[in-house]
Amino acid sequence: MIVSSTADRSIDPPLRVMALHALLYCERLFYLEEVEEIRVADANVYAGRRLHDDVAGLDDETPEKRSLELSSDQWGLFGKVDAVRRRDGKWVVYEHKRGRCRRGDNKEPLAWDSDRIQAVAYAVLLEEHFGESVPEARIRYHADKATAFVQIDQQARDDLRTAVTRADHLRNTVGRPAVTENERLCTRCSLAPVCLPEEERLLENRGETASDTSSPEAGAYPSNRERQTLHVTAQKAYVTRRGESLVVKTEEGDQVLPIEQVDTLVIHGHGQVTTQAIHLCAWKGVGIEWMSYGGRFTAGLTNSPGRVQQRIRQYRALARPDNCLRLAKALVHCKIENQLKYLLRSTRSEAAKREQIQPSIDRIRECVKKSSSSPSLETLRGLEGMAAKQYFAALPVLLGQSVPDELRPTGRTRRPPTDRFNALLSYGYSLIQATVHRSITEVGLEASLGFLHQPRSAAHPLVLDLMELFRTSLWEVPLIGSVNRLQWKTDEDFSIAGAQVWLSQEGRKKAIGLFEQRLQESYKHPLMGKSLTFARLVELEVRLLEKEWTESPGLFAQWRLR
Ligand code: SF4
C-alpha cells in the first residue's frame, strides 16, 4: 500500500497513532497536542491509563501479544496496540476504551470515528509487521461492556489515508483550526482550559451568551487552580526530592509535599534546590521562580517545549506597530479604569475623603477617556504615567485614621523603597511579576516580546505589560485593606537599613499569605459571565491575549473591578 501524503518523511517525524484519534475527535485538539505540543493529563486521561494498566489485563483472557509496539515508515505512523490475538487463524487487533460505544439503528454497538481510525491504523501496522492480512479490529467499551467490530476493508484504508494526509497538512500550517461545532466534545476535552472554546464562541454570539452559564461547556475553563504554589522563605532552606515528592528541609524540620499538589516552587532569598528536585519539577511541569531576599523577581524556569508555531504567531503579531498600539490601548484603559474604580469605590460612603481626592479622580477620568484614542505608544505611556501620579497621590487618603504614621506613604518610591508602605507595594508587585511570568511560560508565549514596555535587561517586557492589569486588584486592594485592619507591625515586619526599607522574614511571610489568599478569591468575569479565582484570571488574560493574534480578538483586558 502506497500512502499519498503531503509529508516529507525525511523532515516530518512519524505520527503517533493516538494523534489520529485526537484528529478525528477534534482537529483543534490534534493541532494543540501535536503541533504546539501542549498536553494536559486530566482525570479522564489518568483513568484511561489505569484502564490500560489494570482492567485490560483482567479482561483479555487469552491475549497472544499485549502492548505491542508497531511502526511503519510507509504510513509514517507508530504506536502501541493494547493487544492482538489469533482468531480463526487471523490476527485481530483489540483496543480498550473506558467510555460507552456509539449505538446503531438497531442498538448494536458501533465504534466512534476517532476510536475506529485508531483501530484501523493499528491493524495496517500489524499487517506490515506480520506480513499477513488483518481483517478485523475489536474495540471493547468498558462503561457498557460492549464490543464494537471494525472491518479493515478498502474503505477503512482510504479513511486512514485521508486522516494521515489531513494530519500532515495541519502539521505544516501556522494557524490553529477553529473550535469544534460539537460543543459536547469540549466538556470531555482535557485541553479545554487551554483552548478556551466557550470564549471563542462567546465572540461569535456576543451579546447573546455572555451570561449564559448554563450551557454544557460553561465549566470547561476551571474556575480554580488545582495545585498550590510552594513558597520557600527560610534562608537556610534546602529543597530536595524524595520519590514523587519535594522535601523542604529547614532548621525547623522537613516538610514533604507530593509534586502533584504543587504548581510552582518559589524560592525567596538564598534557599537551595537540588538538581534532582529541579528534574522532578521539570518532568512534572512545575515551574520554579527565584526572588531576591529583598523581594525582586530574579528568574523563572519552566520545562516549556519549543512551541515554535505559537512563537511565530506572536512574533508576527507584535512586530506590527498597529497591533502593539491596539493592545496597549486596551491594557492601559483597563489599568487606569481599575484605578479609578477603586478610588471611587473606596470613597463611596465617605464624602470628606471623596472631596479630598476629587481632583485626582477628575484627572484620572480624563486619562481614561484619552487612552482609547491615543495616537501613539508614547502618548499612551504619558497618560499612564499621569494617571499613576494622581492615583498614588490619592492612595494615602484611603488609609484609616488609626493607621500609624510609619505606615503612611510619602509618594511612590522604589528601587529602593524608602518607607514601609512602599516596601509593601514593591514586594507585592514582585509577587505579581512572578505569577504573571509563570502564566506566560505556562501558556507558551515568549516573555521577552511585549507591546507596551521596552525591552530591558532585567525584566521581560511582556511580563511588565501584563502586570499592569493586576497591580490594583491583586495587591493594592488587599494591601490597603490589611493596613486598615492594622495587620502590620511597624517593627518586626520590616527591616530598615539607612534610607532603605525592606520586609523582614515575618513581613515577607505575611505578604505572601495575603497575596496567596487574594489569588484564591473569586471574581465574576463580566464578559465570561462566570466566577474565577484571581489565579485563574491571570492565566485567562494571558490566553485571551494570545487569542488577539490567533482567531478571536476583542476579549483581552476587558475585565474591570466592580
Ligand atoms: S476544547 Fe473543544 S474545540 Fe478545543 S480542542 Fe477540545 S474539543 Fe476541540
Image (cartoon, helix red, strand yellow):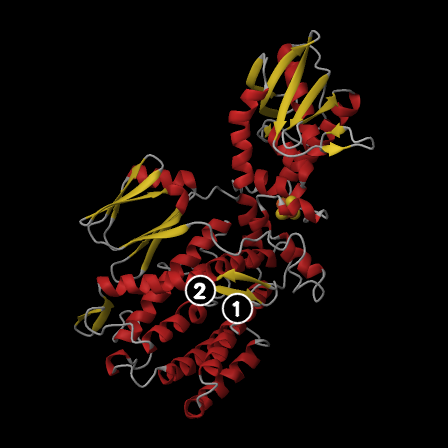
Mark 1, secondary structure of its residue: helix
Where residue 479 appears, as percent x and y from the top left, is: 36, 72
Mark 2, secondary structure of its residue: helix
- State the image quarter where residue 278 is shown: top left
Mark earlier in primary sequence (1, 2)? 1
| Vertical relation: 446 (above or below) 16 | below
Most extreme residue toward the right, as rendered?
Answer: 105
Whether residue 418 appears in this view of the structure is yes
Whether residue 175 appears in this view of the structure is no
Which residue is more in the foreground, 138 or 274? Answer: 138
What quarter of the picture does the N terminus occupy? Answer: top right
The answer to whether the residues at label 1 and label 2 have Cβ atoms under 8 Å apart is: no
- State the image quarter where residue 412 is shown: bottom left
Q: Mark 2 packing: few (<14 Cα in 10 Å), some, or many (20+)?
A: many
Where residue 132 appears, as percent x and y from the top left, is: 69, 10
- State the image quarter where residue 458 is shown: bottom left
Q: Mark 1 packing: few (<14 Cα in 10 Å), some, or many (20+)?
A: many
Which residue is more in the foreground, 309 or 66? Answer: 66
Where residue 196 appears, as percent x and y from the top left, is: 60, 53
| Vertical relation: 506 (above or below) 290 | below
Q: For mark 2, what is the residue?
A: 467
Q: For mark 1, what is the residue?
A: 331
**Amino acid at dot 2:** Met
| Vertical relation: 273 (above or below) 100 | below
Left or right of 424, for residue 478: right
Where residue 2 appears, as percent x and y from the top left, is: 72, 20
- Distance CA(mark 1)–CA(mark 2): 10 Å
Left or right of 525, for residue 159: right
Most extreme residue toward the front, as rendered?
Answer: 144
**Amino acid at dot 1:** Leu
Which residue is more in the foreground, 173 or 433? Answer: 433
